[in-house]
Amino acid sequence: MSTITLISGANQGIGFATASVLAKVHNHHVIIGSRSEEAGAQAAALVRAEGGSVSSIQLDLTSDASIEAAVKNIEREHGLIDVLINNAGILIDGKNPDQSTRDLFTETFATNVIGTTLMTEAFLPLLRKSSNPNLIFVSSRMGSLHQATVKDTMFYAIDYKAYDSSKAAVNILALNYARILEDVGAKVNVVCPQLVKTNLTGWTDYGITPEMGAERIVELAILKKEDTISRTFSDRDGPIAW
Ligand SMILES: NC(=O)c1ccc[n+]([C@@H]2O[C@H](COP(=O)([O-])OP(=O)(O)OC[C@H]3O[C@@H](n4cnc5c(N)ncnc54)[C@H](OP(=O)(O)O)[C@@H]3O)[C@@H](O)[C@H]2O)c1
C-alpha cells in the first residue's frame, strides 16, 4: 500500500515541488491541498502526467468548513494519512504600506499559525491511524530565536516581524504536537527550505529552486518506522538552532 501524504499549499512553490518528488520518485500517493480547487487540479494533472499518483483537495486554512470537508473527504477515500506536511504559508510584511500592524499580524497569524494549528488538529485522528505517522512543519530560520540575535546574517536588518514571529510560533507548535503524538511514536520535525525562488519571495534571484527547497522536506517525509529522527529543526545543510 502506498504512503498517503497530504501537503497544504501544494499547488505551487515548495509544496508543489515536494508533492512532485514524493509522488514520482518515492511512490507516495500525494494529496495536493490547494485553496483554489482549479489550481489544485491543474497541479495534480502535471504530476500525474509524469507518472505520479496524486489527487487534489480544496483546502483553505482560514476556513473551518474547508478543513472539515477535506478531513471527511480524505477519511472516506483513504481512511488515514501517513504524512502530513504543513507547508502553506504567507509572508506579507511590507507588501501593503496602508495595512495596519494589527491587520498585518491578524492576517499573517490567521494562516501561518491559527490555520496551521486547526488543520493539524483536524487531521490528528487520521494521522493517528497510520503505522508510521509523520508530521512536518515547513517553517523558516526567520523564526529561530537564536538566528534573530546574530547580527551578521543577511536577514538581520529586514523587518519581517509578523512573519518571523508566526514562524517562531510554528516551531513551538510543532514541539507541542511532538508531545501530543508521543503515544503513537509519531515523528514531528520542522524544516526551513532556505531562501527559495517562489511567489512568496517574489522569485528572488538569490533563491534556490523549489526542488532544492523541497530536499529536506522529502528526506523527512520518507523516514521509515524504525528511524528515530524527531523534534528536529533543520535545512538541507543540517541542524538549525531553535
Ligand atoms: N520561499 C522561501 O524562501 C521560503 C523560505 C522559508 C520558508 N518558506 C516557507 O515555505 C512554505 C511554502 O512557501 P513557498 O515559498 O512555496 O510560497 P508560495 O509559492 O507562495 O506557496 C505558498 C502556498 O501556500 C498557499 N496558501 C497561502 N495561504 C493559504 C491558506 N489560507 N490556505 C491554504 N493554502 C494557502 C498558497 O496558495 P495560493 O497558490 O492560493 O496562493 C500556495 O499554494 C511557506 O510556509 C513559507 O513560509 C519559504
Image (spheres, rainbow, N blue to C red):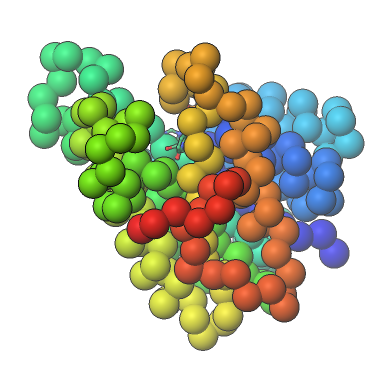
Which residue is depicted at the point 34% across and 41% down? Answer: 142
Q: Does residue 163 appear to the left or right of 73 in the view shown?
A: left
* Residue 226 point in image, percent of width and height: 72, 78
Residue 219 position, x and y percent, is 68, 54
> Is 12 situated left or right of 231 in this image?
right
Vertical placement of 92 versus 54: above or below? above
Residue farthest to the right, as pictured: 51
Residue occupying the far bottom of the picture = 183
Query: Residue 200 at what x, y percent from top left?
Result: 44, 25
Residue located 41% across and 62% down the image: 174
Residue drawn at (22%, 15%) of the image: 96
Q: Residue at x 23, y 46 (%)?
A: 149
Is residue 59 at all visible to an observer of this figure?
Answer: no
On the image, the x and y values in percent for residue 117 come to: 37, 56
Q: Quadrant of residue 152?
A: top left
186 versus 60 height, above or below: below
